[in-house]
């Protein structure tokens, strides 16, 4: 299958979940083999930050890329949208340190990508790694695994004491046909919004996080149920966890042939698994 890039540029502006700062993102077509990469256009010399697992510098409540003072935070939703929609090469210019949260999902990004369309490039995609033995990362009862499989599938489970969430499982397959894969991602995974627990919000704000969070860009759940219904799916929270996993694993460049199985996992565990896959190389 050939590589693809955008047929035209995309521009979006919005507030960052953790910084609370408004930034503008321009996503531009890029040459074959360049991959997906960020450019900090607000800094001298326009530093480039490749969207690669080796560049992950922080994984607390989001995934951050960079080194030292030069970084990009909360990249997972945008990268999930690009990879899920089949964009192999893209230059992502941003005038700040955090990707806008928008509505808390990847729907705005996928709609933008669908609107401008893709163009095929005269170079084939990188041959995906094939996971040939089970790989697992765990912390307590939370885990994420890559299991040998003939195609790429993501399965996720979550379990919360709050009755409105409870125990949820969902599974989604990434087909090899670009059009079917992008349509499936855009309708089944991308619309799922980030979610938070009411009793944790004050603590997170006191520690300097979620400064840009609101009921407009995140689902919030308390003992009595959701503060801002309706949900887009009955199991929207666990679908959002798949969205995060897709975004984190996209840092491998192409998705390995494997069944990715996760339970109560985190960005940190996702990235540890991606790094282990990269290190082994199969």
Image: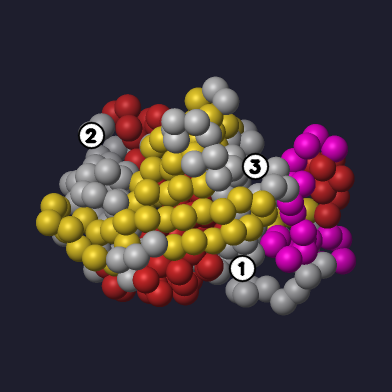
- Which of the two discs, 1 and 3, labels the residue nearer the N terminus? 3
x and y, in percent, of residue 64 in the image: 54, 37
Q: In front: mark 1 or mark 3?
A: 3
Q: CA distance from mark 3 to mark 2?
A: 30 Å
Q: Quadrant of residue 161?
A: bottom right
Q: Which mark is residue 184?
A: none
In the image, 14: left or right of 208?
A: left
- Which of the two discs, 3 and 2, labels the residue nearer the N terminus? 3
Position above or below: 113 against 121:
below
Q: Which mark is residue 235?
A: 1
Picture residue at 64% right of the left edge, 42% below the top: 61
Q: Is residue 223 magenta?
A: yes
Under tag 3, what secondary structure? Answer: loop
Q: Which residues are magenta?
A: 206-226
Query: Furthest-front residue in view?
Result: 44
Q: In front: mark 3 or mark 2?
A: 3
- Residue at numbered disc 2: 282
Q: Nearer the viewer, residue 132 or 193?
A: 193
Under tag 2, what secondary structure? Answer: loop
Task: Kindly check if marks 1 and 2 are in contact, taking CB atoms under 8 A apart as contact.
Answer: no
Q: Nearer the viewer, residue 262 or 277?
A: 277
- Which of the two discs, 1 and 2, labels the residue nearer the N terminus? 1
Q: Which mark is residue 61?
A: 3
Picture residue at 63% right of the left edge, 58% below the top: 14
Position above or below: 235 against 20:
below
């Amino acid at each position: 299958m050939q590589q693809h890039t955008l047929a035209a540029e995309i521009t979006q502006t919005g507030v960052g979940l953790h910084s609370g700062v408004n930034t503008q993102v321009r996503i531009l077509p890029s040459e074959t083999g360049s991959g997906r990469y960020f450019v900090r256009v607000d800094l001298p010399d326009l530093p480039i930050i490749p969207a690669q697992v080796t560049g992950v510098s922080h994984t607390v409540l989001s995934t951050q890329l960079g080194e030292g003072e030069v970084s990009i935070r909360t990249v997972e939703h945008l990268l999930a949208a690009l990879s899920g929609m089949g964009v192999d090469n893209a230059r992502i210019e941003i005038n700040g340190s955090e990707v806008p949260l928008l509505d808390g999902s990847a729907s705005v990004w996928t709609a933008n990508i669908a609107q401008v369309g893709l163009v095929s490039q005269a170079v084939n995609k990188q041959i995906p790694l094939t996971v040939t033995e089970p790989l697992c990362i765990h912390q307590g009862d939370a885990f994420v695994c890559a299991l040998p499989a003939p195609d790429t599938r993501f399965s996720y489970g979550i379990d919360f004491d709050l009755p409105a969430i409870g125990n949820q499982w969902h599974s989604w397959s990434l087909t090899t046909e670009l059009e079917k894969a992008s349509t499936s991602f855009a309708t089944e995974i991308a619309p799922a919004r980030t979610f938070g627990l009411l009793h944790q919000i004050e603590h997170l704000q006191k520690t300097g996080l979620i400064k840009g969070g609101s009921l407009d860009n995140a689902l919030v759940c308390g003992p009595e149920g959701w503060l801002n219904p309706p949900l887009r799916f009955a199991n929207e929270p666990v679908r959002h966890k798949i969205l995060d996993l897709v975004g984190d694993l996209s840092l491998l460049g192409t998705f390995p042939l494997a069944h990715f199985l996760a339970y109560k996992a985190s960005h940190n565990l996702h990235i540890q698994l991606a790094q282990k896959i990269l290190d082994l190389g199969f």
